């Protein structure tokens, strides 16, 4: 990096954050069988900020995202070394309650995956199986709150008992976000949440992300660099399973430190 | 990569258009000063006639910058280049406007007896032209060190202007019959001093483009 001279102001520093780290990752390595997918990843994810992961296909960004709530545990033959700390607590510690971890660190996937149930039952699902409400009124309130937080309440409030599968793609994705929010997670992981949506539905999701960061720590994987620039405070660039650079998003898109990052975001990669 | 090829083509096109605009601006300034010093009214009229080409080129570069931003969404050094071009273009157009004002002054002064040769004016003009040429070279090669060096040269133009100002005020005070011509020459000197300031702006943008550092207003 070219350091600014005395009296000069570097570009792209406006949203640099000093917020407290919600998630701290130290020397994380991840293996699919004998194949190593992540190499010595260390980074901190600030509380109530949006961090975007960018990088070419197969660079490990989605794999890394899934290490944050141990979703990779469901894949046979996988193995992780290193530390992932949530509020200082080791999420890979023996005996840790993974179900509870995934309640605290929720996830929204690339393709919306509503259950073949009613809109209400989709959002109520996590509350019911985790026994997070004590009566019907509380359940209804929590479902409504989650739908409001996901900015879909006005569109579904009059048809809560109808099938979620009747919603549009964008509505289904926001319903899945509501389902994730209903159990009141602390961190929300989003794996290309708008990649299958049209521009209007994408804009709604992006506006929602900016709104949600008031309450949640959000990590988003995206192939759309303009989307990363629009919604995130901090951007991390991955390449071949390695973390090349983490920086304030403005800095990343106007003057990245690493040539590899610059080549990627200017389309001169490879 | 398709996007890469389109973007590179557009950036090369922008670069060549800015070079063309810079060249026309340099020529306009040099011809305007020559028209004044050599008392060549025909040359002054050519400067005014050719200014329309510079205006059209400015509009063309404006449109190209907007197209590149909208269609190619450049980032990092490409983004800094396009933004800098968009900001340098109106600066060059304004320098050309100053050249036109000098040409108009030359046309007026050439109809009157020559006041007296002022050595500072050709020196100011030579300095402004040299600075402009060096600044454009630095801009097109993204050379921040060269741009920083050019900025320092503006002090000499400011000093020459100050000397010219004092000399002309004294002349006009001692001989009121020279006031009209003296005032026009003073305006010419002011135009050249402003050109020096605009060249400084171009150099500051060059530093931003090359290093992503804002040096404007940093003394």
Image (cartoon, coloured by chain):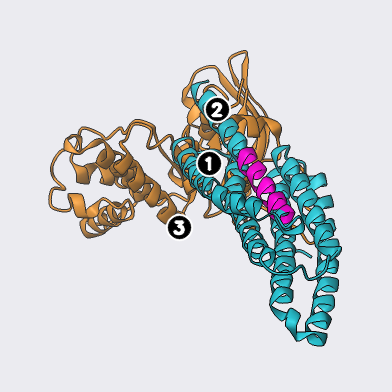
Chain colours: A orange, B cyan
From the viewer's perspective, is residue A63 above or below residue B154?
above
> Which disc number belongs to residue B9?
2
Please name which of the two marks, 3 or 1, marks the residue nearer to the observer. Answer: 1
| Label 3 to label 1: alpha-carbon separation | 17 Å
Asked if residue A76 lies left or right of residue A238, the reply is: left
Report the residue marked by disc 3. Answer: A215
Task: Sort mark 3 into few (<14), some (14-19) or many (20+) by Cα contacts within 10 Å.
Answer: some
| Label 2 to label 3: alpha-carbon separation | 45 Å
Marks 2/1 in contact by CB < 8 Å: the verdict is: no
Please report the bounds of the magenta region as a residue range.
B18-34
Please name which of the two marks, 2 or 1, marks the residue nearer to the observer. Answer: 2
Regarding residue A84, the answer to whether it shows in the image is no
The residue at 65%/44% (across/down) is: B22
The residue at 73%/62% (across/down) is: B192
From the viewer's perspective, is residue B96 above or below residue A76?
below
Q: Earlier in the sequence, mark 3 or mark 1?
A: 1
Marks 2/3 in contact by CB < 8 Å: the verdict is: no
Task: Sort mark 2 into few (<14), some (14-19) or many (20+) by Cα contacts within 10 Å.
Answer: few
Asked if residue A174 lies left or right of residue B112, the reply is: left
Looking at the picture, tell me which residue is in the foreground, B76 or A77.
Answer: B76
The residue at 26%/59% (across/down) is: A141
Mark 1, chain letter? Answer: A
Q: Would you say residue B140 sits in the magenta stretch?
A: no
From the viewer's perspective, is residue B153 above or below residue B217?
above
Task: Please provide percent x and percent y for residue A78.
Answer: 56, 20
> Which disc number belongs to residue A52?
1
């Amino acid at each position: 990096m070219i350091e600014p001279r005395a009296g000069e102001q570097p570009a792209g520093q406006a949203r640099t954050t000093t917020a407290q780290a919600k998630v701290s990752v130290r020397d994380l390595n991840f293996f699919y069988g004998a194949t190593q997918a992540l190499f010595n990843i260390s980074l901190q994810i600030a509380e109530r900020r949006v961090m975007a992961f960018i990088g070419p296909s197969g660079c490990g960004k989605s794999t890394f995202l899934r290490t944050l709530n141990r979703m990779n545990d469901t894949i046979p033959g996988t193995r992780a070394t290193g530390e992932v700390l949530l509020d200082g607590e080791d999420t890979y510690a023996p005996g840790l309650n993974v179900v509870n971890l995934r309640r605290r660190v929720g996830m929204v996937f690339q393709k919306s995956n509503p259950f073949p149930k009613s809109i209400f039952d989709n959002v109520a699902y996590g509350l019911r199986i985790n026994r997070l409400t004590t009566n019907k009124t509380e359940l209804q309130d929590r479902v409504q709150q989650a739908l409001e937080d996901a900015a879909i309440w006005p569109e579904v409030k009059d048809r809560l008992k109808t099938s979620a599968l009747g919603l549009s793609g964008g509505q289904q994705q926001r319903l899945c976000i509501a389902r994730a929010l209903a159990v009141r997670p602390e961190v929300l992981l989003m794996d290309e949440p708008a990649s299958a949506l049209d521009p209007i539905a994408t804009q709604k999701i992006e506006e929602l992300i900016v709104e949600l960061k008031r309450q949640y720590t959000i990590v988003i994987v995206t192939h759309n660099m303009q989307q990363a620039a629009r919604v995130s405070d901090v951007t991390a660039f991955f390449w071949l399973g390695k973390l090349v650079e983490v920086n304030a998003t403005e800095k990343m898109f106007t003057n990245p430190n690493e040539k590899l990052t610059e080549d990627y975001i200017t389309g001169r990669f490879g | 990569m398709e996007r890469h090829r389109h973007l590179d083509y557009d950036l090369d096109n922008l670069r060549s258009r800015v070079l063309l605009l810079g060249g026309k601006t340099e020529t306009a300034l040099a011809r305007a000063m020559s028209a004044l010093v050599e008392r060549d009214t025909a040359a002054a009229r050519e400067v005014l006639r050719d200014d329309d080409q510079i205006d059209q080129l400015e509009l063309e570069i404006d449109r190209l910058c907007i197209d590149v931003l909208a269609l190619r969404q450049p980032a990092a050094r490409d983004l800094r280049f396009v933004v800098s071009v968009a900001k340098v273009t109106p600066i060059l157009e304004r320098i050309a406007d100053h050249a036109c004002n000098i040409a108009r002054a030359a046309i007026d002064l050439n109809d009157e007896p020559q006041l007296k040769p002022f050595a500072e004016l050709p020196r100011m003009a030579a300095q402004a032209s040299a600075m402009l040429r060096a600044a454009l070279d630095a801009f097109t090669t993204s050379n921040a060190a060269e741009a920083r060096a050019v900025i320092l040269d503006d002090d000499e133009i400011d000093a020459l202007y100050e000397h010219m100002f004092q000399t002309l005020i004294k002349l006009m005070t001692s001989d009121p019959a020279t006031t009209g011509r003296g005032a026009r020459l003073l305006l010419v000197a002011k135009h050249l001093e402003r050109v020096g300031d605009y060249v400084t702006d171009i150099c500051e943008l060059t530093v931003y483009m090359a290093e992503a550092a804002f040096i404007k207003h940093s003394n």
